[in-house]
Image (cartoon, rainbow, N blue to C red):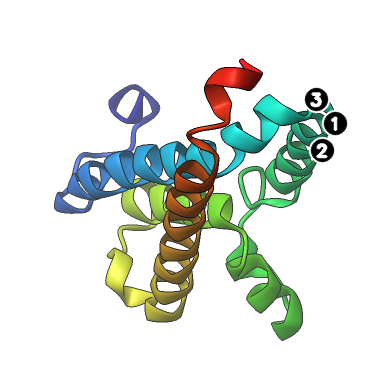
């Protein structure tokens, strides 16, 4: 797609091999965190679907969150993990920037990743004996 649209290939495009597995792992961990609770309550599943669609539309997929003039909004957008991936792919393929040029964005995402991972492990270990009975 990049070649057809006239965007050249560069060394920055190799970040794809960082963002793609990281995105996969993050959303697997997010599924581990929410799936056990969704098995117990259909309302919880509906709440997660609503929250995730809201997070998607607020994320910087359609627009660049770097263009905000308000400092508060810029920092608020850093809390959205989908925004991290959107900015990462945009930086790698369009702006030719490295992922470590925005250390605060990376640190916040890694902290969110650790929290989601810990929550997933906690929920799974807590509910693994009850899940077969519910399913």
Residue 47, position in %: x, y?
82, 38
Q: CA distance from mark 3 to mark 2?
A: 9 Å
Q: Secondary structure at mark 2?
A: helix
Residue 47: which disc? Answer: 2
- Is residue 52 toward the left or the right of residue 7 in the image? right
Regarding mark 3 in the picture, which secondary structure is present there? Answer: helix
Q: Position of residue 61 (x, y in %)?
A: 61, 44
- What's the residue at 37%, 37% (across, down)? 24
- Structural crowding at the residue carrying mark 1, measured as other residues with C-alpha within 10 Å and reported as few (<14), some (14–19) or many (≥20): few
Specify whether residue 70 is in view.
Answer: no
Quadrant, the C terminus:
top right
Foreground mark, 3 or 2? 3
Give yes or no for contact between labels 2 and 1 (Cβ–Cβ under 8 Å). yes
Q: Label 2: how many residues lie within 10 Å, few (<14), some (14-19) or many (20+)?
A: few
Which of these two is toward me, 40 or 103?
Answer: 40
**Disc 3 or 2, which lies upstream in sequence?**
3
- Whether tag 3 and tag 1 are in contact, CB under 8 A, the answer is yes
- Gap in angstroms between the C-alphas marked 2 and 1: 6 Å
Q: In the rendered image, which residue does mark 1 sit on?
A: 43
């Amino acid at each position: 797609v990049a070649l057809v649209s006239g965007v050249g290939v560069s060394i920055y495009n190799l970040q794809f091999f960082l963002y793609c597995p990281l995105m996969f792992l993050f959303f697997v961990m997010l599924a581990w965190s929410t799936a056990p609770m969704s098995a117990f309550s259909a309302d919880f599943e509906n709440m997660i679907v609503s929250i995730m669609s809201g997070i998607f539309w607020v994320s910087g997929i359609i627009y660049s969150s770097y263009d905000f003039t308000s400092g508060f909004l810029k920092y608020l957008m850093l809390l959205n993990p989908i925004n991290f991936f959107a900015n990462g792919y945009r930086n790698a393929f369009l702006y030719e920037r490295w992922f470590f040029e925005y250390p605060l964005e990376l640190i916040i995402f890694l902290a969110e990743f650790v929290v989601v991972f810990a929550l997933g492990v906690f929920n799974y270990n807590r509910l693994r004996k009850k899940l077969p009975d519910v399913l």
